[in-house]
Image: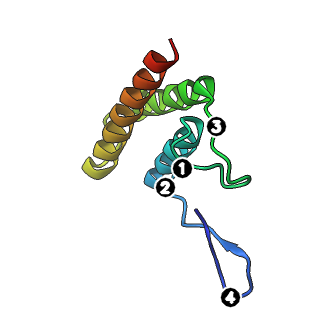
């Protein structure tokens, strides 16, 4: 979540591959209902949205294979594994 500077403007972190991946993962957590939507403060589930974000992360993993440093690759792998497990658990609860 961006912080506010003394002038009350949002200050976003610098854009890196890792911050981009974390942003997609954070959005997926909102879709899982694990994190409140920052704009409303409400929690809700949207498993189609979560699946879409997982698909984006999987595409990024495929397209960047062999081009990431060890930290970036590990972060992407861990995030994908965590989101896949959470998604499967919620889909099982739904069915």
Image-based side of 81 in relation to 11, left or right: left
Q: Quadrant location of residue 15?
A: bottom right
Ranked by sequence position, the earlier of labels 1 and 3 is 1
Q: Position of residue 79 (x, y in %)?
A: 38, 40
Residue at (43, 52) in percent of width and height = 18
Horizontal side, residue 44 vs residue 21: left or right? right
Q: Secondary structure at mark 4?
A: loop
Measure the C-alpha gap from mark 2 to mark 4: 23 Å
Distance of label 1 from label 4 (alpha carbons): 24 Å
Q: Of discs 1 and 3, which sits in the foreground? A: 3
Mark pair 2, 3: CA separation: 24 Å
Residue ranking furthest to the left = 70
**Which residue is depicted at the point 46% across and 51% down?**
17
Q: Nearer the viewer, residue 81 or 71?
A: 81
Mark 4, residue position: 6
Foreground disc of the pair 2, 4: 4
Q: Residue at x 32, y 37 (%)?
A: 77
Sequence-wise, the earlier of marks 3 and 4 is: 4
Comparing labels 2 and 3, the label whose residue is closer to the camera = 3
Name the residue carrying label 3: 44
**Is disc 2 in contact with disc 1, using a CB cutoff of under 8 Å?**
yes
The residues tagged by marks 3 and 4 sit, at their Cα atoms, a distance apart of 32 Å
What color scheme is it?
rainbow
Q: Where residue 68 sits in the image (x, y, percent)?
A: 34, 44
Q: Are marks 2 and 4 in contact (CB under 8 Å)?
A: no
The residue identified by callout 1 is 23
Q: Nearer the viewer, residue 24 or 14?
A: 24
Question: Would you call the spot at circle 3 few (<14 residues within 10 Å), some (14-19), or many (20 or more)?
Answer: some
The residue that mark 2 highlights is 19
Q: Residues within 10 Å of mark 2 (few under 14, many from 20)?
A: few
Is tag 1's residue or tag 4's residue first in the polypeptide sequence?
4
């Amino acid at each position: 979540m961006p912080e506010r500077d003394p002038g009350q403007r949002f200050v976003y972190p610098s854009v890196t591959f890792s911050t981009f991946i974390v942003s997609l993962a954070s959005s997926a957590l909102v879709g899982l209902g694990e994190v409140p939507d920052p704009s409303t403060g409400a929690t809700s589930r949207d498993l189609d949205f979560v699946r879409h974000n997982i698909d984006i992360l999987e595409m990024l993993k495929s397209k960047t294979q062999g081009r990431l440093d060890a930290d970036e690759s590990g972060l992407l792998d861990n995030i994908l594994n965590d989101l896949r497990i959470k998604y499967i658990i919620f889909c099982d609860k739904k069915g």
